[in-house]
């Protein structure tokens, strides 16, 4: 996926409420009806891209502290986060990355939930090395049937 990242590409840096206002003003009605792709870069700054963007492209091919999907709602003349998840099969971030997301959202001044509104549990199979999404606490690889570890083990350099 990194090979598809264009030089100078990446999501829009959102470091203030004004940045978010400006970026959202350029979105279509259909885009606003869906969640957006987000990453929190290693600099702690939020980056946004349209939903069908790859997280790795949103990050400009760089490492991230977290990634997922995010939705906004307009309330009392400002934007707030209505939903946020760690759903990113490009980076497979652990649910423990929430504090990094919270800090980035707080830096922008956005009202936000107290945690991910949808938590996705990712594990890499020690047997076949495939990435899995764990559902209903069933820590078994869907590809080879091996047991998956209880703790996050996805390579952060993915």
Image (cartoon, rainbow, N blue to C red):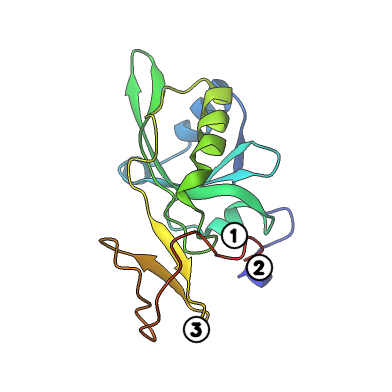
Res. 10 visible in picture: no
Q: Nearer the viewer, mark 3 or mark 1?
A: 3
- Going 58% across and 52% down the picture, which residue do you hit? 58
> Which residue position holds label 1?
56
Residue 156, percent from left and from top: 63, 60
Residue 2 is tagged as 2
- Which quarter of the figure has residue 28? top left
- Where residue 101 sits: x, y (%)? 52, 37
Q: CA distance from mark 3 to mark 2?
A: 25 Å
Q: Which residue is mark 3?
A: 127
Observer able to see residue 157: yes
Q: Position of residue 153 (x, y in %)?
A: 54, 64
Which element carries disc 3, helix, strand or loop?
A: loop
Q: Which residue appears at 35% of the width and 69% of the height?
A: 139
Q: Label 2 near label 3: C-beta < 8 Å?
A: no
Q: Residue at x 38, y 55 (%)?
A: 120
Q: Nearer the viewer, mark 3 or mark 2?
A: 3
Which structural element holds mark 2?
helix
**Relative to 133, residue 44 above or below:** above
SS category of the residue bearing label 1: helix
Residue most extreme to the top: 76
């Amino acid at each position: 996926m990194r090979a598809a990242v264009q030089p100078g590409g990446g999501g829009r840096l959102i470091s203030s409420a004004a940045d978010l206002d400006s970026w959202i003003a350029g979105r279509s009605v259909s885009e606003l009806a869906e969640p957006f792709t987000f990453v929190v870069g290693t600099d702690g700054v939020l980056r946004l891209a349209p939903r069908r963007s790859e997280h790795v492209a949103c990050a400009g091919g760089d490492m991230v502290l977290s990634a997922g999907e995010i939705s906004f709602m307009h309330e009392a003349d400002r934007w707030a986060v209505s939903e946020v998840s760690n759903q990113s099969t490009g980076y497979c971030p652990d649910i423990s990355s929430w504090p990094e997301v919270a800090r980035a959202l707080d830096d922008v001044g956005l009202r936000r939930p107290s945690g991910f509104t949808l938590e996705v549990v990712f594990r890499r199979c020690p047997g076949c090395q495939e990435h899995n999404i764990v559902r209903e606490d069933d820590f078994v690889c869907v590809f080879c049937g091996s047991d998956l570890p209880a703790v996050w083990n996805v390579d952060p350099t993915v």
